[in-house]
Amino acid sequence: MFIPFFDPTMILLIPALILAFWAQAKVHGAYKRFSGIRNTSGLTGAATARRILDRYGLQKVEVEMVQGSLSDHYDPKKQRVRLSEGIYDGASIASLAIAAHEVGHAIQHSEGYAALQLRHSMVVPVNFGSMLAFPLFLIGLLFSSPTLMDIGIIFFTLAVLFHLVTLPVEFNASRRAIHILATDGYIRPNEADGAKKMLNAAAWTYVAAATMALLQLVRLLLLRGMLSRDE
């Protein structure tokens, strides 16, 4: 019998793990580099976010600071752009790029961007399914219950779909950010390359997460097939 988390199918996850480590190193490297380069506008991430939001008629969306490094995100429920300390107060190229990216999500929300709406609608079922997927699958494998394994796989598939839907949401927010920063004069042409590199590095973390989820799903399906052959 093959036990999850300690079986030959674990080899499938090695490429995803390598990609994940590489993506984390890439984003932290880019942040370290571009957070040390002051933008010529002299605007902080918070000021940039506020200006862009106001320009798009999103005065109701608040900008606030949160603890942590690279913990920046947009909260659609409370309609708040939350920026980490280094981004909120920083006046670097990284600060402008990341702040504009999070504002890009707020703009997506206001425009009813389809992929973002789909992702929001998936949050509750995905959280529920993710919590039960592996326990059900493991119980099903230990007690040779294909039904429980199938339910676990279905629940985990929801998580995989969530990761896949996240990709266009993040890529679109980055494209919006670069376009706004460049066309509205927040960054000069020679700074645009740095902003793109910062956001591209961040995007790889989402690619890595989606890859890991896909390969994990393949692994579960293989384990399910092994049980069928043993019956």
Image (tube, rainbow, N blue to C red):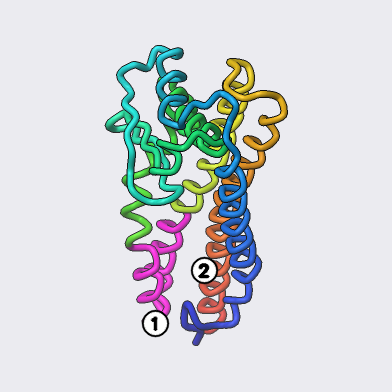
In terms of secondary structure, where does tag 1 sit? helix
Residue pictured at 66% horizontal, 37% vertical: 194
In terms of secondary structure, where does tag 2 sit? helix
Q: Amino acid at mark 2?
A: Leu
Cα separation, mark 1 vs mark 2, equals 14 Å
- Mark number, residue 220: 2
Determine whether 97 is above or below 164 in the image: above
Residue pictured at 44% horizontal, 18% vertical: 51
Does residue 97 appear anywhere in the picture?
Answer: yes
Q: Which residue is mark 1?
A: 142
Determine whether 45 is above or below 160 in the image: above
Q: Amino acid at mark 1?
A: Leu
Q: Is residue 26 magenta?
A: no
Does residue 114 appear anywhere in the picture?
Answer: no
Q: Quadrant of residue 195?
A: top right
How far across and down, in percent of the image, does residue 111 sit?
Answer: 45, 19
